[in-house]
Every structure is written in C-alpha cells, then in structure tokens.
Amino acid sequence: MKKYLPVLRNSSFFKGLTDEEILSILHCVEATAVSKERDSYIFRAADSTEVMGLVVSGCVLVIQEDLWGHRNILSKCHAGDFFGEPYAASPGAVLNISVVSDEDCEILLLNIQRLLVTCPTACEHHQKLIRNLVSVLANKILILNDKITHVGKRTTREKLLSYLSAESIRHSSLSFDIPFDRQQLADYLCIDRAAMSTEISKLQKEGFIKTNRNHFELTVSKNVDSRMKGRAIY
C-alpha cells in the first residue's frame, strides 16, 4: 500500500493525516487493491456493496443507464476521488448507479462500515477520518447540485452555457479543459450529441466560445471579464 501514498496524501479523505496514520487506516478498513481494464464494470446497478472505491490511477465514470443503452453520466472520478460511499454506508442499499473504468485504472476498495463502528484498535485518527468522510459526502452533494442546475435548463444552448460558465468559475479562468470528450459531455448534460455539436458550432460562429477538443475558451465583454477577475476565486 505504500506505493499509493503520493495519491492518498492529496485525497480529501486522508486530509490532515500522516503517512503512518494513512497506512494504519488502510489496514483498519481492509483496503484491497484491484486493477481494471478500460470499459470494465467496478459496480453494477441493482447490486449492493459494502465497500467504496478510491481511484489511485486512471479514471472512472459514475453512470446511470437503461436497458436500451442510453447513458447518463453523473460524474467522472480521477486519482484521489471516491465513489460508492453512500451505498457502502447504507447496508443492503441497492445501487441505482454503475461505475465503469474510462481507462485502465487501479482502485482501492475500502470497507466503510469499519469507520462507522468503534475502532477495535482505538486509533486516535478515527474521528478525524469520519469528519473527512462527511466532507467528501457533502462535496458529492454539491457536485450533484451542479449537474441538476445544468440539466434543468430548457435548451441545449442553455445547458452548455451553464456548464461552461460553472467550469470557468471552478478553474478561475476563461480558458480551461473539461474532463469529458464530446460524447461524455452530451451524456452528462442529457442531450443529443449531434444537437450539442451543432450548438457548439453556432456558439463559436457567434463568438461566445472557442474550442479544440476538450479545451474551451469563453469570449466575454471586458466588463464581464473585469467582474470575474474581481471575484475572490482569482
């Protein structure tokens, strides 16, 4: 497990913990490392799980899909990100999401139930870890709220501009990369890819955006640019 420490140190779940404490926690939560090839399922909808996943290399997609193969991307998790925490914390809860590897990846599976009972070794960092878990769960709620905001818009253009505006603020820049390719972006915003591509072309022609693959640059008036630079995020 020591080889994963560079990633784990930067994970919000292990914030404020020493390397020795992290290794002790991994033992406490029965951490197990698994490797997955691209497009492999890690969790499947309709199953249940007692473990949550931590990405230590590569990335995974948290998705919902129907019997006809229509896919709704809820989030994309990179190294240091977690998935499946709410289900692992609710024994017997049935997954209504699937988690699939977007590229070859390594995952640590952690038994979250070991955190929700009195630690058998009475480790001093147990409470610290629970606080971090609450923070992780709260952040997931904020991410879901962002998605609801975007998909709640009425038109493809409004959904795109809502998402791109939020990403610009998150990156504190008018020029940024998004984590999705075109199909994934369409699946995330719950819109048709062809319609989305048409709208992106229109937005470029109208001077709202510049884009190349997953890189976007927003073009706004000087007044708007000045207001953005005056935000605390800059």
Image (cartoon, helix red, strand yellow):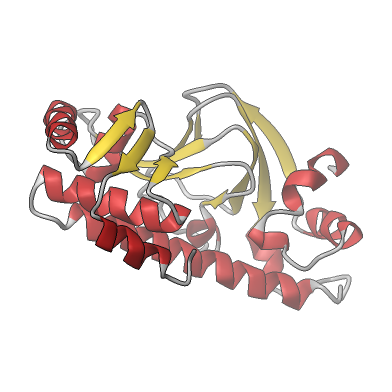
Question: Is 63 placed above or below 153 here?
Answer: above
Residue 170 in sight: yes
Residue extending farthest front? 222
Q: Residue furthest right?
A: 20
Q: Quadrant of residue 117?
A: bottom right
- Residue farthest to the left? 154
**Frontmost residue, 169 versus 77:** 169
Asked whether, in this view, residue 140 is left or right of residue 8, the answer is left
Residue 84: give x, y in percent of width and height: 51, 52
| Residue 114 x/y as whole percent | 71, 64
Looking at the rendered structure, the number of numbered marks drawn on it comes to 0
Q: Is residue 118 visible?
A: no
In-image side of 143 versus 111 (left or right): left
Position of residue 187 measured from the top left corner of the image (x, y, whole percent): 27, 37
- Residue at left 86%, top 62%? 18
The residue at the point 72 percent across, 37 percent down is 33
Q: Could you tell me which quadrant the N terminus lies in?
A: top right
Point 38% across, 51% down: residue: 167
Is 57 on the left-hand or right-hand side of 5?
Answer: left
- Quadrant of the rendered structure where residue 71 is? top left
The front one of 136 and 47 is 136
Tell me residue 215's x, y (percent): 39, 33
Determine which quarter of the picture holds residue 104: top right
Q: Nearer the viewer, residue 209 or 188?
A: 209
